[in-house]
Amino acid sequence: MNVPIYDGCPIWNDKAVPFGFYSSEVAFQTDAIKVTKFVASRLGYPLVDVELQSSSMFTAFEEAVTTYGNELYAYKIRDNQLSLEGLTTGSNLNQALITPSFEPIVRLTEQYGEEAGSGGNVPYYSGSFQLTASVQDYDFEVFMTGSGLTGSDYIHGLEVKRVYYEPKFPASARYLDPYNGFGFGGAVAAGIVGFGGFGQGMGYLMAPLNYDLQVIQQIEMNEMVRMSNYSFRVQDNKLRIFPIPNFDGNMISGSSLLIGQALNVTQGPNVTFAGNVTSSLITLNTSTGTGKDGTAMIYGDSGTNNTYQIKVVNSGSNYTSGDVITIAQADIDASSTNISNAAGDIKITLRDQDITAICGGGTLWFDYILRDERINSAVRQTPTRVTNVSNAPYENPTYEFINSVGRQWIFEYTLALSKEMLGYVRGKYSSIPIPNAEVNLNQGDLISAATAEKSTLIERLRTYLDETSRQSLLNRRASEAESKMVELQQVPYTIFIA
């Protein structure tokens, strides 16, 4: 196959370059012809043949421009990646002026704010344990289950941030409340009892704002230090209270009927007993509410009052005050109570005293976060935003906008690429036989020189870009400012004599 080599007359052809990144730019087309002549001359043409075509050098020129753009924009991405993260990928940053942003710092400080309890991107929640007298340990897993925090979304559990025993409303709500005695003038408003009143315009003593803040803080610190009933220790998923809670006078409703308790009949039938009888076990079913099944016995009296009594034998659970228990007529007929003339079902409306009660020890509050929410807050799916260096919106450079410094680098890199291609072409044959001798080709020299020149050019470009990075320029400006101050100190001071 006889392929013509470079003939010294390069002609631009849009199909001569493989990618055509810059084929539409007139400046690129013009310089492609000039660079081809420059490269051919540096390779020895016309004194020696150059076994390349014009299209080969056009391809090298396109690659050199692309390499220059890649190095330049890779440096720009490294220098500005923190500011680019979150930017839409639909932008084109080739000619954009990028100003550093505080957004990355804010995103970082959100994590510190969450840990300090002063902000952040992880919500805080409040929970509480209703303390029971004589019970010292309380389980956070029980709290999570009771709060519906179950399943894979809560597998990492919760993290307790604060535990406190104090009223649920802040001190400012009491201090500024006009109905608690602080806002109606007199001794309170005058500050005689230690508080400056503030009663929504109905009578108050104007005080500096810092005084009001100090009073509010004093109330809160007093409740935290002097009025706090308990200390605590959190270990694993258990909260241990010190000392063991005592009965505070409040009864907490339980969820089971009291065994042996006589239930108050709300609606019962007219019955006649043959004698003092005791029924077999009768199932207690709730017709309303959330109660479960329990069992009871009916005790009868055949006296003149024909009275009967329902007494709990085996209680169910999950009863609440107000549940209605119905003993059906069929159950009465099937029992051994010997009741006659029954005229309807027996209905019992439960009261607080019918249900087991727990001796309360107060309420312990705690603030917590869900650890899965903290984990999820670290990841945000943004498919149309910059998330890494691979999708930063830089494109190939516009050749027209590259200055003479950049173009000179491109010319030299094109020469190195062309020299490498020529070396591979001449390497097909290490020598060419001629009459009575042979000619050795310089394939090895060309490839070695091209490799060294390419490495040198890349290193030179990267060094130049590093020297013009934002940090380097700021350091240079600081050094210049310091040098100016040293120089100014050498200026003689003028002495004024008054």
Image (cartoon, rainbow, N blue to C red):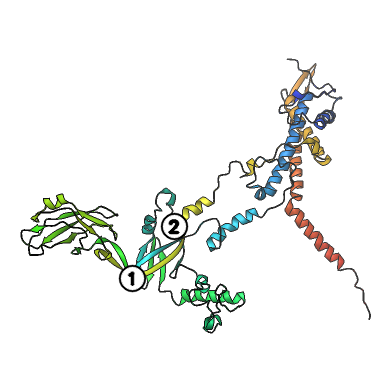
Judge left or right: residue 123 versus residue 17: left
Residue 347's x, y, as percent?
A: 21, 56
Which sits in the foreground, 198 or 52? 198
Q: Residue furthest right?
A: 497
Task: Report crowding for label 2: few under 14, some 14 to 19, many 20 or more residues within 10 A (C-alpha).
Answer: many
Judged from this view, the residue extending furthest toward the top is: 1
* Quarter of the rendering occupied by the C terminus: bottom right
Against 203, is 379 above or below?
above
Name the residue type under label 1. Answer: Asn
Name the residue rendered at 35%, 70% in the picture: 361
When the figure is inspected, residue 108 is found, relative to residue 382, above or below; the finding is below
Q: Which x, y percent locates residue 1? A: 73, 15
Residue 126 appears in the figure: yes
Q: Position of residue 94 (x, y in %)?
A: 73, 41
Judged left or right of residue 21, residue 120 is left
Label drawn at residue 250: 1
* Mark 2 vs 1, N-terminal side: 2
51 vs 347, nearest the viewer: 347
Q: Which residue is mark 2?
A: 158
For residue 476, side relative to residue 325 (left or right)? right
